[in-house]
Structures are given as C-alpha cells and as structure tokens.
C-alpha cells in the first residue's frame, strides 16, 4: 500500500510539473495566489490521483488499547505424560502431531518393580483375607468366653495392619494403571501401557524404543485445541483500563487479514517483575487454525462512543498535524476544469473497523460537506508543492 501511494505521489508531481506555472506569492500576469490551506487540481491531476469523495458521518468507535499475547490452553486441556516408576520403553506408537483419545496407549514400558508391586499386593491380600477370617473367629469365641480379650486385640491389630498395607498397595497399582480387582496370579506382568490422560494432539515426543526414562521425565505433551484461550500482556499504564467482559479483536502474524474476537474473563491486577500483568480471554469461535503457542496482535475495546468519523485513509499526517481535505467546488479557468480543495486540521482519534474518529475545528459546519476519502495522499502531495507550482 505504501509503495502504491508513493507511486501515485510521483505521478502527480510529474503531472504538476508539466501542467502548472510558478507562483511566488504575488499576482503575476493576473494570476490569483492560492490561500495557505487551498489546493487546486485540474481534471488530469484529479483522475491520476484516483480521488473519491464521501461524507463525514457519525459512527460508534470503540476506544481501546493495543496489546500482544499468545494462544494457549487451560490447564485441564494440557497434559504432560510421564511414567510413575520409570523403566525401559518397550515400544512407542505416537509421533509429534498424532491425534490421540483419552485412555489410548501411547507406549509400553518395562520395569522389574512392576512385578514386585503386583506380587507384593497378592501376597498381602492373601494374608489379609486369612487375618480377616481369624479376626472374626476370635471375636466370636471371645463372646463365648473361650478366648481372652488380649488375644482378640492381637488378632484385630494384625488384621487392621494388613488391611492398611493392602489398601496402600492397591493405590500403587491404580497409579500404574492396574485394576486391583482384576489382578490375579496369572496376570502378573512386567510391561505396562502408558495411557493418554486427555484427548487431543501430541505436541512433543521424547521417547524411543530401549530408552530408560525416570519418573520425572516428560515423555510427551498432549494439547486439546478445542478449548484454547487468549493470554494478553498488559502494561502497567493500561492495567486499570482492563476488566472482565471487555471485547477483544485479534489476528495472528501469519494471517493478519483474518480477524478473531474474544471476551476477557479474567484480568490480573498484580504486576510481574517486568511491570506487566496478564489478562485471559475466551475465544468466541475458535477453529483449527489457532494453535497453542501462536503469537497474536490484539486490541482490547475499553469504551464505545458515537463520534464523527471518516474512513481511515481520509486522515493524513503533515508536519506532526492531522488533516482532511474538503472538496469546495469545480470551476472553469481558461478552458480548464479545476477542482478546489481545502485542508482542514483535525484532531485524530481512535481507529476502529477501518474508520477513524476526528474532532473538527470549533464552529465548523459539516452540513453537506464532501471530503476526500480516497486519494488523500495525492492531494497532500499537491498541497506540499503548492508553494512552487500552481495550475
């Protein structure tokens, strides 16, 4: 777009050189001197500039702050998979990007400790079952005054101790993915599956056949992309402007033309060491193109107001000031059709959905006003050179 505008300006300047005569600020040969904020273009210049006229209108403009951030997932939709007791990888069935379902086998792992835990559980379970029978028998005999209270207490202590040991072993089996109720002597195994804790896609893989892994090693990471959220970095000066339920529009650097929307559900008020806070937003209509880890450029809408606005490219900057160009009239000068424009200094406001808010000079009448909505940069080029050239 910038290259196109520069080319238009160069073409317009060339046309001006061949179609305009010198002005010195004085009347020469009856030629009228232009006012400081006046611009005039002949029909050829008007055509080359590609000028289109429009109106100043009232529009609802959302004020806001520009922020950066990233796509992420909530903790319940992100899983790091590891092996509770470690061991050797026997086989692996996933690669990066694989789609997996909750409970699906990701790999098989071998460890002698698996055998020992299962064996220990079955031994304690057998002792517990015997102790339970003995405890009940002694308790009945005690009621019939056959056994002493001391003997019953000893039997009860042994029974409860074995029960606690058995329950502890059951929990170890559950962590390993073994159902204690289904474990028998014939089903003892040294190989156990590593199961997917959630459904989603495998983001990273760190396992291969024969590799020994520790309990703390992350074997793979799984992400559920159906519940991605927006994480936004808010600078200290903007923290008080951000709150829950505010709307956000954002895009990704690889596809800046596609605009997404989101709604803030949590805004942090505590500053990090770098003087920033985090805000979190729910994406309104996520799709498969938004992946965890993607960077985004976003705008948080803080307030809305109905103000005077024009298309974004209507407002141009010159000498650190903002201007729009008003169409005044069309006239005939020495057989040439001349279009007169006037540069009006304005205060530039927020830009939203392709429109920019403006504040006109006090007392300015906008009734039936026509403004340059396309070709404003070409009119600016003619205005900047008006001191040296005129039609």
Image: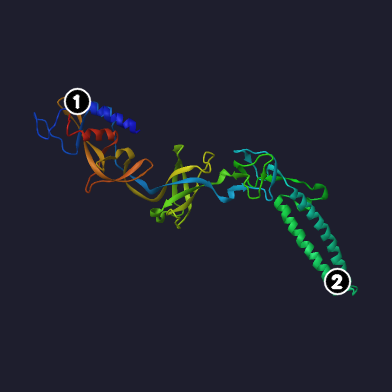
Q: Position of residue 182 (x, y in %)?
A: 78, 50
Q: Position of residue 370 (x, y in %)?
A: 26, 38
Q: Nearer the viewer, residue 326 or 343?
A: 343
Quadrant for the C terminus in the image: top left
The numbered disc on residue 151 is 2
Q: Earlier along the polypeptide chain: callout 2 or callout 1?
A: 1
Q: Nearer the viewer, residue 253 or 111?
A: 111
Q: Is residue 17 above or below residue 295?
A: above
Q: Nearer the viewer, residue 121 or 24?
A: 121
**Closer to the eye: label 2 or 1:** 2
Q: Residue at x 79, y 48 (%)?
A: 188
Dividing the picture into quadrants, the one containing residue 356 is top left
Dividing the picture into quadrants, the one containing residue 346 is top left
User: Which residue is denoted by mark 1 in the rendering?
Assistant: 19
Tell me the SS state at disc 1.
Answer: helix
**Alpha carbon separation for disc pair 2 and 1:** 122 Å
Disc 1 packing (10 Å; few <14; some 14–19; many ≥20): some
Q: Residue at x 78, y 65 (%)?
A: 160
């Amino acid at each position: 777009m910038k290259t196109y505008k520069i080319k238009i300006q160069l073409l317009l300047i060339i046309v001006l050189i061949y179609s305009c005569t010198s002005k010195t600020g004085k009347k020469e040969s009856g030629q009228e001197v232009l006012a400081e904020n006046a611009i005039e273009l002949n029909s050829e210049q008007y055509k080359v500039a590609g000028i289109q006229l429009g109106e100043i209108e009232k529009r609802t403009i959302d004020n806001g702050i520009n922020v950066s951030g990233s796509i992420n997932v909530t903790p319940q939709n992100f899983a790091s998979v590891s092996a509770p007791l470690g061991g050797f990888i026997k086989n692996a069935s996933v690669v990066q990007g694989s789609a997996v379902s909750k409970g699906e086998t990701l790999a098989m792992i071998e460890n002698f400790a698996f055998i020992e835990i299962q064996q220990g559980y079955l031994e304690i379970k057998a002792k517990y079952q015997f102790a339970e029978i003995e405890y009940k028998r002694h308790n009945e005999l005690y009621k019939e005054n056959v056994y002493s209270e001391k003997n019953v207490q000893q039997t009860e202590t042994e029974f409860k101790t074995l029960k606690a040991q058995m329950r502890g072993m059951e929990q170890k089996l559950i962590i390993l993915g073994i159902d204690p109720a289904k474990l028998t002597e014939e089903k003892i195994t040294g190989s156990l599956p590593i199961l997917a804790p959630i459904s989603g896609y495998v983001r990273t893989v760190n396992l291969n056949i024969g590799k020994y892994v520790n309990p703390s090693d992350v074997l793979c990471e799984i992400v559920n992309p159906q519940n991605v959220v927006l994480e936004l970095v808010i600078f200290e000066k903007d923290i008080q402007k951000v709150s829950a339920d505010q709307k956000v529009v954002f895009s990704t650097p690889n596809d800046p033309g596609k605009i997404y929307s989101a709604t803030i559900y949590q805004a942090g008020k505590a500053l990090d060491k770098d003087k920033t806070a985090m805000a979190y937003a729910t994406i309104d209509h996520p799709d498969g193109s938004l992946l965890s880890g993607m960077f985004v450029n976003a705008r948080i809408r803080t307030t809305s107001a109905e103000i005077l606005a024009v298309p974004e490219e209507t407002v141009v900057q010159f000498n650190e000031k903002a201007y729009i160009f008003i169409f005044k009239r069309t006239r005939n000068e020495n057989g040439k059709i001349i279009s007169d424009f006037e540069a009006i200094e304005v205060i530039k406001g927020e830009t939203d959905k392709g429109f920019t808010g403006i504040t006109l000079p006090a007392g300015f009448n906008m009734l039936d006003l026509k403004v340059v909505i396309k070709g404003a940069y070409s009119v600016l080029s003619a205005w900047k050179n008006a001191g040296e050239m005129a039609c």
